[in-house]
Image (cartoon, rainbow, N blue to C red):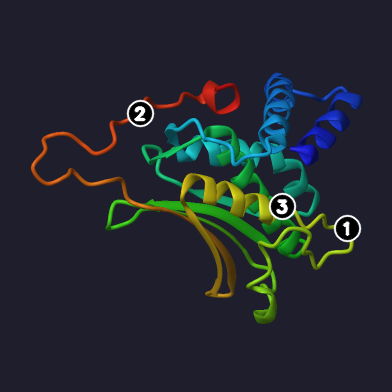
Amino acid sequence: PLGFLRHFLRQVGQGRATEQQLAVGEDEVARLDRMLAWVRRLQRPVPVLRQVKVHVVCDRAIVLLRGEVDDRGQRCSVDVPSDLLVEADPDPMLQAVANLLRNAIQAAPIGGALGIRAARDTDGGVTIDVWDTGPGVPTQDTARVFTPWYTTRPDGSGLGLAVVQRVASTFRWSVEVERADERTIFRLRVPPPPRVAVGTTEDVAAPRPEATLEQVSTP
């Protein structure tokens, strides 16, 4: 989000800001305010869960970080079905996906490639992968990448991936990192929904309403 705002302010200064950028900038200031309130809570925050379209969150994350991708001459792809839904709190979910995407941008080389892909698993769960063509995480560091304050970059805060892990834990998701096909993959795993209890005619958990595009930024 801060990278987007820096890029946005440059565009404003050059008189090239679009109406979409103005709208997204306003949304992001409001979302950052909500996220700060979320982080400041001493107890584990209780997520406000709803049905969220995965592609809406991924598209917004790319809009926020497009300036950094372009500055590094990288290629960014998205492979997310338009009808894929997960149960989540949209604001923290967007923060987690954006953090993973920014990590991929920083890990991929200049002119390299990165992307997001998501799919429904055979068990009914959902997998969201953020990948890059960087050198990968050293084996000795894989157990520490989600630890607060741990970073391998001189200018890194060591909090980006820790926030991802915290959000995933709050949603009862999992997050892991692996190396495959010369790509580093950070994987968010959304478990399948509860099954119908034996002897009942109703779902264990009632379905929640679907979030709209506006609700991702202003729930």
Q: Residues within 10 Å of mark 1 (few under 14, many from 20)?
A: few
Residue 173 falls left or right of residue 130:
left
Q: Where is residue 156 in the image (x, y as percent from the top left)?
A: 83, 57
Up the image or down, 102 lies above or below 51; here it is below
Q: How crowded is mark 3: few (under 14 residues within 10 Å), some or many (20 or more)?
A: many
Sequence-wise, the earlier of marks 3 and 1 is: 1
Residue receiving disc 3: 160
Front residue of 196/18: it is 196
Residue receiving disc 1: 155
Q: Residue at x 68, y 27 (%)?
A: 34
Corner quadrant of residue 57:
top right
Mark 1 or 2: in front is 2
Up the image or down, 183 lies above or below 35; here it is below
Corner quadrant of residue 36:
top right
Front residue of 89/102: it is 89
Determine contact: label 1, label 2, CB under 8 Å: no
The alpha-carbon separation of the residues under discs 1 and 2 comes to: 41 Å
Corner quadrant of residue 18:
top right
Residue 6 falls left or right of residue 187:
right
Residue receiving disc 2: 208
Residue found at the very far left of the displayed protein: 199
